[in-house]
């Protein structure tokens, strides 16, 4: 097996990043050099076999990948019934591929081999709980002005009675499952043969101690369920997609670590009147044809309440007015409100109205050069020239 140890790349005298072309070239050169008919050393046959074996693996991308990962392509390689002791024979640089194998097979839970123990401690150190994200709808106006909203939350907290131990009166005993080691060793069969797998004891969570008697308050859980309603401040001008963080109200921490956080993923509900465009607000309003012609002061809604808007004489349908500072106020910027004006044409006229409109039309027809001014003068009763 010592031969297996020899690096295939070294045998073929190529780098680990060599291309297939380079591998092929080097193989041809070496095969020629060490061909038993040419090379007259005592190890001629062995060298030649070695080169061919190396080429067989490295010229096949799949085998090469397996070799890169596991350091071997032989499925029977090392039937280590003797557990980790069997690895001893490889010593030295032979360790690395096995670390890789074990890491890929068992993840962080593996340890117990020759002090390399890359992860055994991580399992018992405090870890913050998971963050929890919840979707949360808020009204359009709450988003504009900011608000304090009530959010019911469910979470777990270390039990006050037993200080997370889960033990009645804090009395603990040695974990019978792992005999206080905090870790358990199981023999698992793998394609490398039977192996010892070490993992955190599920009963004591790695502490090696379990409650003598379960705490009454938390039934030995060490954590208590809480349900409460929190007042959560929503900043003014908040947009859909913004996340509001509520610290410590997420998933339970591990090994005494703090809880994760709760995030509210804000969705701002739409409003029938106001549309938001960034920090600006858009609304539509409808005025009469006469107000459009003559101008007027009208009332329009804003997010701050009703406000006056000056409609200029001669306003066209679809014309847009800007109301400065009447948009969304954020910490950085204040938006404006844009008002799109619809002009309503009357559909029914009284007899008197019909007469007046007809009179205007006749009047305009007689003086076509400045029709708009004429209409306006007509309505405002200004003297004609
Ligand atoms: Zn245990
Ligand atoms: Zn308790």
Image: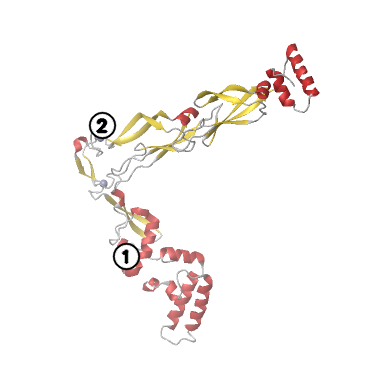
On the image, the x and y values in percent for residue 165 come to 24, 39
Q: Quadrant of residue 322?
A: top right
Task: Characterize the local packing of mark 2: few (<14), some (14-19) or many (20 or more) Cα atoms within 10 angstroms.
Answer: some
Q: Nearer the viewer, residue 97 or 141?
A: 141
SS for callout 2: loop
Q: Which residue is painted at 44% across and 83% down in the image? A: 44
In the figure, 231 relative to 13: above or below?
above
Name the residue that disc number 1 marks: 86
Name the residue that disc number 2 marks: 217
SS for callout 1: helix
Looking at the rendered image, the quarter that the C terminus falls into is top right
Which label sits on residue 305?
A: none
- Earlier along the polypeptide chain: callout 1 or callout 2? 1
Residue 350 seen by the camera: no
On the image, the x and y values in percent for residue 268 come to 49, 32
On the image, the x and y values in percent for residue 253 come to 32, 42
Q: Which residue is painted at 52% across and 78% down in the image? A: 28
Most extreme residue toward the front is 385
Q: Quadrant of residue 5?
A: bottom left
Ligand 2 within 8 angstroms of badge 2 C-beta: yes
Q: Whole-Å distance between the Cαs marked 1 and 2?
A: 49 Å
């Amino acid at each position: 097996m010592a031969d297996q140890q020899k690096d295939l790349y070294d045998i073929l005298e190529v780098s680990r990043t060599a291309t297939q072309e380079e591998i092929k070239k080097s193989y041809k050169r070496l095969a020629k050099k060490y061909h038993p008919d040419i090379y007259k050393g005592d190890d001629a046959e062995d060298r030649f076999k070695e080169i061919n074996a190396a080429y067989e693996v490295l010229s096949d991308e799949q085998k090469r990948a397996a070799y890169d990962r596991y350091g071997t392509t032989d499925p029977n390689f090392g039937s280590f019934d003797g557990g980790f002791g069997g690895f001893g024979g490889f010593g030295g640089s032979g360790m690395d591929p096995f670390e890789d194998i074990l890491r890929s097979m068992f993840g962080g839970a593996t340890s117990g081999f020759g002090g390399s123990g890359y992860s055994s401690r991580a399992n018992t150190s405090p870890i913050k709980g998971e963050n929890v994200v919840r979707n949360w709808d808020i009204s359009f106006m709450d988003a504009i002005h900011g608000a304090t909203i009530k959010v019911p939350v469910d979470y777990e907290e270390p039990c006050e009675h037993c200080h997370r131990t889960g033990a009645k009166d804090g009395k603990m005993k040695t974990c019978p499952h792992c005999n206080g080691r905090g870790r358990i060793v199981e023999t698992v069969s793998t394609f490398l043969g039977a192996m010892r797998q070490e993992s955190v004891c599920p009963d004591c969570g790695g502490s090696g101690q379990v409650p003598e008697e379960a705490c009454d308050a938390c039934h030995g859980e060490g954590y208590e369920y809480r349900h409460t309603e929190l007042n959560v401040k929503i900043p003014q001008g908040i947009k859909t997609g913004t996340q509001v963080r509520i610290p410590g109200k997420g998933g339970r921490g591990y090994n005494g670590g703090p809880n994760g956080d709760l995030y509210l993923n804000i969705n701002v509900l739409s409003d029938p009147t106001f549309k938001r465009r960034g920090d600006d607000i858009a609304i539509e309003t409808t005025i009469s044809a006469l107000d459009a012609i003559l101008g007027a002061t009208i009332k329009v809604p804003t997010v701050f309440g009703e406000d006056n808007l000056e409609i200029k004489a001669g306003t066209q349908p679809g014309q847009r007015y800007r109301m400065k500072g009447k948009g969304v106020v954020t910490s950085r910027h204040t938006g404006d409100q844009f008002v799109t004006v619809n002009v309503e044409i009357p559909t029914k006229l009284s007899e008197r109205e019909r007469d007046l409109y007809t009179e205007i039309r006749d009047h305009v027809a007689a003086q076509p050069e400045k029709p708009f001014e004429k209409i306006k003068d007509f309505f405002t009763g200004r003297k004609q020239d």
